[in-house]
Image (cartoon, rainbow, N blue to C red):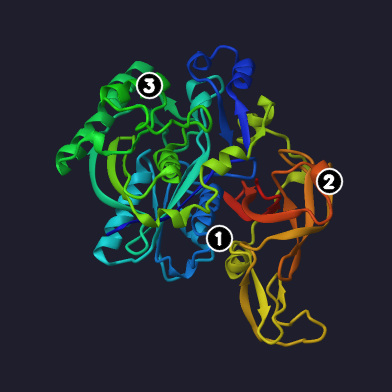
Amino acid sequence: MVGITSYGAYIPLQRINRKVIFNATGWSTAAVSMPGEKAVANYDEDSLTMAVAAAIDCLDKLEREKVDCLYFATTTPPYRERQNAGIIATALDLRPDIRTSDFSDSLKAGTGAFLAACDAVKAGADKHVLVCASDCRLGKAGSLLEMTFGEGSAALLIGNTDVIATLEGSYSLTYDFMDQWRADGEKFNRIWEDRWVRDEAYTRFIPQAIAGLLKKYKLNLQDFSKVVFPCIYLREHAAIARTLKLDEKQLQKEMLTTVGDTGTAHALMMLVAALEDAKPGDKILVASYGSGSDALFFHVTENIEKARNRKGIKKHLASRKDLTNYEKFSSFRDIIPMEVGFRGEVGGTRVSMAWRERKSILGLNGAKCKRCGTPQYPYQRVCVNPHCGAIDEMEYYRFSDKKGKLFSYTSDSLAFSASPPEMYGVVQFDGGGRFAFNLTDCEPEALKVDLPVEMTFRKKYVDYMRGIHGYFWKAMPPRT
């Protein structure tokens, strides 16, 4: 049977309490009905970098060479014309002879990409398909959407061997319903009146999709251990559950008060959370939302125990840092324009060089000497081992999944950073190899020699003159 063979997720380190937003904007009524906090992507993160992080979690200890296809679902791609899934595949160091595709423009693009992946595996076109869903949406200051939106991502590997949760069936609804929208070129999402969205969409589409699935496969809701569906209104989420006559234990807890509405990733992140607690034999029903709904029916297998070593939702939720400054939160997404000064200006991107060095830049591939086994970054033709000196006897060696320790470090208060000071460190990789990287998701006072670090794919700069987003790898302390 076709289904999920592995899962992963990513939630940014920083969280902002909604009271901080309310105290800064003052008039938003959303704070009354929206308690808790939401996840905030760092200034060097976006939907693409978070998708890479979730994919790394999903592919942990798996052979990346076996991935035949990658689908990326998002409504906030960094590029409108350049395949974002191709950048993710390169960053993950996947084979070049794979199929990649972007799914966008609807909040149910995540489940749409998942169903397309399952169809591809069923048809025999691909054996292992990786689906990433991620969003980084913006609401205007003081709006319900600013309160609601959170950032995060999910990744699911689809196949027909060693399946941990089989896809037993699905039912889809499609409606051209305007609840939230963002025209091309606009920065902020728009939303129609709450009652319209709540009463005409959530309370109708989700129950209708679930009822259609149950009727199609002659099922009963009491057959399911968990029922998963998103809703940006907490009271309505509970009301829908009552309408469906769900037992409290059956209802998968919403993530609005801990992470926020993560768009295309929302339903899939909730699915990952359900899988983390699932037992063999459990049945899980997932209904997404956006331009209708996709309802999916899963059956958990005994292989679920093999997937417990993921960071997933639980470990990312436990690893957190408070962001108490609304101005810093706003500057991360350029809601408040920042003066970068001449030190923050970016020169022209060398597109041709970026293409030639893509395995080194995006994939963080160095070289490993075939004669003596010495790894080095960046890729060189000559072995750096003074006792070897082999020439043109190198093979590519991936550093992105290697851990290391800080050999030395420094911080720079003069260099521009959206979250100063800018920090740098020379990383000594486990197994060999050494290079200097920017440091992120840490404070200067926490830095020390031999501090354990791991690599994270981040946004390095934006070349506004040419509309180019530059990505590279940074080092950060492991999240515990």
The numbered mark, 3 or 1, whose residue comes first in the sequence reads 1
- Residue that mark 3 sits on: 192
Disc 3/disc 2 C-alpha distance (Å): 45 Å
User: Image point 73% across, 88% down: which residue?
Assistant: 390
Disc 3/disc 1 C-alpha distance (Å): 38 Å
- Please determine whether, in this image, residue 369 is positioned above or below residue 315: below
Residue type pointed to by label 2: Asp
- Please determine whether, in this image, residue 396 is positioned above or below residue 346: below
**Split into 4 quadrants, where in the image is the N terminus?**
bottom left
Other-residue count near label 1 (Cα within 10 Å), few / some / many at <14 / 14–19 / ≥20 = many
The numbered mark, 3 or 2, whose residue comes first in the sequence reads 3
> CB under 8 Å between callouts 1 and 2?
no
224 sits left or right of 467 in the view: left
Q: Position of residue 448 (x, y in %)?
A: 83, 50
Q: What SS does tag 3 mark?
A: loop
Q: How many marks?
A: 3
Q: Position of residue 181 (x, y in %)?
A: 39, 31
Q: Is residue 41 visible in this depiction of the protein? A: no
- Please determine whether, in this image, residue 264 is positioned above or below residue 385: above
The numbered mark, 1 or 2, whose residue comes first in the sequence reads 1
Q: Position of residue 184 (x, y in %)?
A: 43, 38
- Residue that mark 1 sits on: 91
Residue type pointed to by label 3: Trp
In-front residue for pair 393/314: 314
Q: Position of residue 272 (x, y in %)?
A: 44, 45
Q: What SS does tag 2 mark?
A: strand
**Split into 4 quadrants, where in the image is the C terminus?**
top right
Q: Quadrant of residue 362?
A: bottom right
Q: Quadrant of residue 303?
A: bottom left
455 sits left or right of 89 in the view: right
Residue mark closest to the camera, 3 vs 1? 1
- Residue that mark 2 sits on: 412
